[in-house]
Structure formats: structure tokens, C-alpha cells
């Protein structure tokens, strides 16, 4: 095999590894963001539990206030009762008093309900605090590991890029240019094997005579896709039935 073909194969291997490393690198920032969103989500859940408890406590305070008002009113009505002259006025005031008393009862039941709700909300808040702390700790740890992985990958990419450029320097410019052109054109592998008598890149059949020459080590450029076709350990001629 021509020396430059082996050089191109080595360069191609180096580039493939770099491609993989770079795609790993690209994946990491998204994963870090996902973990940050997870932290925010848990914190928001916890804030919602805090808000729920706060609202219950506020309603309790409001009920207590209204109950105090009703009690004051009731005392006032009872005083007024003594000053009333007519039966009608007296009965009306008794109705008023009964109404206030029923309202106070309502307030008492609501206050009791709210006490239970408060207990529940406090338990939920405690639970959500634990869940949040666990999740946040887990996510922070994960972010730390991802950042470490990111640094290692960046270092790896840097070293391998240097190696790759070292390999590229050994290759004659015209071959390197062709290699770069094919890679930039999205052809992926530039040096491919002869597979079942066809170009391993675009699957175009190679004339039998050329196939024999490829096996002998002659350079063959695929007329369709422009890749270098070489004989590799997976290579074979066209099968009988295909011909
Ligand atoms: Zn081809």
C-alpha cells in the first residue's frame, strides 16, 4: 500500500476519535442545564409548599380576627337587648344574636379545619424540604462530575488535536486537501475498504480488473464519490451470484 494511504488511514482514525470526543463534549452543557433545571424545579416545589402553609396560617389569622369581631358584636347586641322597648325589636335582636352565635360556631369549625390543614401542610413542607435537599444534593454532585468530565474531555481533545495535526503535517498537501474536501463534504470516511467488489463508501461496483489491482496495492479513487478504495481485512471481490 502506498505510504500516503496509510497516513490518511491514521489521520482518519484520529479524526474519528476526535469526532466522538467532540460529540461527547457537546452533550455535556445540555446535561448540566438539565440538572440545573431539576434543582430549580425542586426549589419551586418547596416554595409552593411554603406558600401553601403561609396561606393556611393567614386564613387562620383572618378567622380569629372575624371571630373576635363577632364576639364583640354579640356582647353589644346583648347589651342593647336590655334597652329595647317593643317585643318586635326584642325578637329582631334575638334573631340577630342567634345569627351571630351561629356565625361564631361556623368560625370555630373553620378554625378547627384549618388547624388540621396546618398540621398536614407542615408535614408536607417537611417532606418536600427533605425531597428537595436530596434531589438538589444529587444534582449538584452530578453537575460537579459533568464539569470534571468536561474538563477532561477538553484536555483530551486538545492533546488529540495536536497529535492529529502532527499526522496531517506528514501528508502531502494535495492528498491532505482531497481528504479535507471529502470530509468537509460530509463523506465521513475518506479511505474505505473494497466490500463485495464495491466502493465501501457509496457501494458503487468497482470493475473486476480494478478490484484485483486494489488487492495488489494500487491506489484506486472511486469515480462516483471520490473516496480512496483500499484492500482491508474485511475486503472481498464481488460474489459469484452478484456478477
Ligand atoms: Zn464510492
Image (spheres, grey):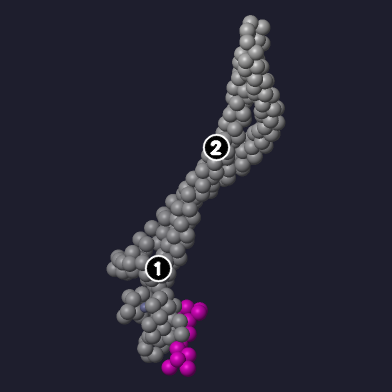
In depth, the one of 96 and 11 nearer the eye is 96
Apparent side of residue 36 relative to residue 138 in the rendered image (left or right): left
In depth, the one of 34 and 124 nearer the eye is 124
In depth, the one of 156 and 78 nearer the eye is 78
Circle on res. 188? 1
Rendered residue at 59%/32% (across/down): 52
Q: Which residue is mark 2?
A: 44
Q: Name the spot of residue 122 as percent of width and height, x first.
A: 67, 31
Q: Name the spot of residue 85 as percent of width and height, x first.
A: 63, 7
Residue 28 belongs to magenta span: no
- The segment highlighted magenta reads 231-243
Q: Name the spot of residue 133 as percent of width and height, x first.
A: 63, 37
Q: Name the spot of residue 152 as percent of width and height, x first.
A: 51, 48
Rendered residue at 66%/36% (across/down): 124
In depth, the one of 84 and 136 nearer the eye is 84
- Which quarter of the figure is the N terminus placed in? bottom left
Q: Quadrant of residue 202?
A: bottom left
Q: How many marks?
A: 2
Question: Badge 1 local density, few (<14 within 10 Å), some, or many (20+)?
Answer: some
Rendered residue at 41%/54% (across/down): 162
SS at badge 1:
loop
- Against 84, residue 127 (above or below) is below
- Which quarter of the figure is the C terminus placed in? bottom left
- Against 212, residue 143 (above or below) is above
- State which tag comes first along the sequence, 1 or 2: 2
SS at badge 2:
helix
Amino acid at each position: 500500500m502506498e505510504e500516503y494511504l496509510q497516513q490518511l488511514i491514521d489521520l482518519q482514525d484520529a479524526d474519528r476519535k476526535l469526532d466522538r470526543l467532540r460529540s461527547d463534549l457537546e452533550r455535556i452543557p445540555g446535561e448540566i442545564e438539565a440538572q440545573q433545571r431539576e434543582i430549580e424545579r425542586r426549589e419551586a416545589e418547596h416554595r409552593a409548599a411554603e406558600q401553601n402553609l403561609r396561606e393556611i396560617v393567614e386564613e387562620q389569622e383572618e378567622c380569629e380576627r372575624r371571630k373576635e369581631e363577632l364576639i364583640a358584636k354579640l356582647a353589644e347586641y346583648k347589651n342593647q337587648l336590655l334597652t329595647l322597648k317593643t317585643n318586635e325589636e326584642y325578637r329582631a335582636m334575638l334573631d340577630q344574636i342567634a345569627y351571630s352565635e351561629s356565625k361564631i360556631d361556623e368560625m370555630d369549625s373553620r378554625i378547627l379545619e384549618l388547624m388540621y390543614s396546618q398540621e398536614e401542610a407542615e408535614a408536607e413542607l417537611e417532606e418536600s424540604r427533605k425531597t428537595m435537599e436530596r434531589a438538589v444534593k444529587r444534582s449538584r454532585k452530578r453537575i460537579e462530575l459533568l464539569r470534571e468530565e468536561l474538563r477532561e474531555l477538553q484536555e483530551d481533545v486538545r492533546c488529540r488535536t495536536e497529535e492529529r495535526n502532527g499526522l496531517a503535517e506528514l501528508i502531502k498537501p494535495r492528498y491532505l486537501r482531497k481528504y479535507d474536501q471529502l470530509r468537509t463534504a460530509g463523506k465521513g470516511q475518506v479511505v474505505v475498504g473494497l466490500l463485495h467488489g464495491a466502493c465501501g463508501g457509496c457501494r458503487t461496483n468497482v470493475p473486476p480488473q480494478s478490484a484485483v489491482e486494489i488487492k495488489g496495492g494500487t491506489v484506486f479513487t472511486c469515480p462516483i464519490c471520490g473516496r480512496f478504495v483500499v484492500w482491508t481485512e474485511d475486503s472481498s471481490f464481488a460474489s459469484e451470484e452478484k456478477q
